[in-house]
Amino acid sequence: MSGQIADVLCSTCNVPIRGPSSPKPTDLLSCPKCGVSGTHTEVMASVKGYSTEHVGGQVQSMLGNAFRGNKSVTFTPTATSSRKYQFIVKLDD
Ligand SMILES: [Zn+2]
């Protein structure tokens, strides 16, 4: 049975990707629109990297606000990675 993988989106098309409902690590998941595909392992690695980066960015901007105006603290945000994740997950704002 084929179905939608909960909350995992193709970052290019922003549509849910599809694959087996209980994918094994080597099963291919793919975007129904552009056809990009990856194994479950690859997809999960991309999702994990994306969500880690996203959450990290929020923390950085919170720290930036906290230190703004305080001349004794120089806050230098670390460069945001420009790595593009093919598979992303919907995150609550
Ligand atoms: Zn796509």
Image (cartoon, rainbow, N blue to C red):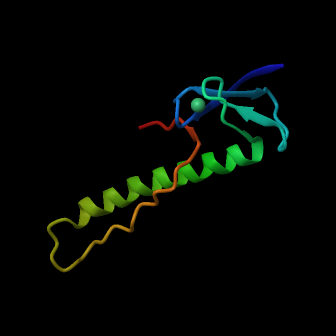
At horizontal 62% and vertical 50% (from top left) the residue drawn is: 48
For residue 49, above or below residue 39: below
Q: Position of residue 80 (x, y in %)?
A: 41, 61
Q: Residue at x 19, y 80 (%)?
A: 72
Q: Is residue 15 left or right of residue 35?
A: left
Residue under the image location 24 percent in, 59 percent down: 65
- Residue drawn at x 65%, y 23% is 32
Tell me which image quadrant ligand 1 sits in.
top right
> Where, by quadrant of the figure, is residue 3 drawn?
top right
In this rendering, position of residue 75 left or right of residue 69: right
Q: Residue 64 location in percent, x, y?
A: 28, 62
Eyeballing the image, is 65 above or below 9? below
In this view, the residue in front, 13 or 88, is: 13
Q: How many marks?
A: 0
In this orientation, which residue lies closer to the viewer: 12 or 52?
12
Answer above or below: position of 63 versus 72. above
The N terminus, quarter of image: top right
Quadrant in which the C terminus is drawn: top left
Seen in the image, is 65 located left or right of residue 80? left
Question: Residue 8, how many percent across, how many down?
Answer: 62, 34
The answer to whether 45 appears left or right of 10 in the picture is right
* Res 38 quadrant in image: top right
What residue occupies the far bottom of the structure in this picture? Answer: 72
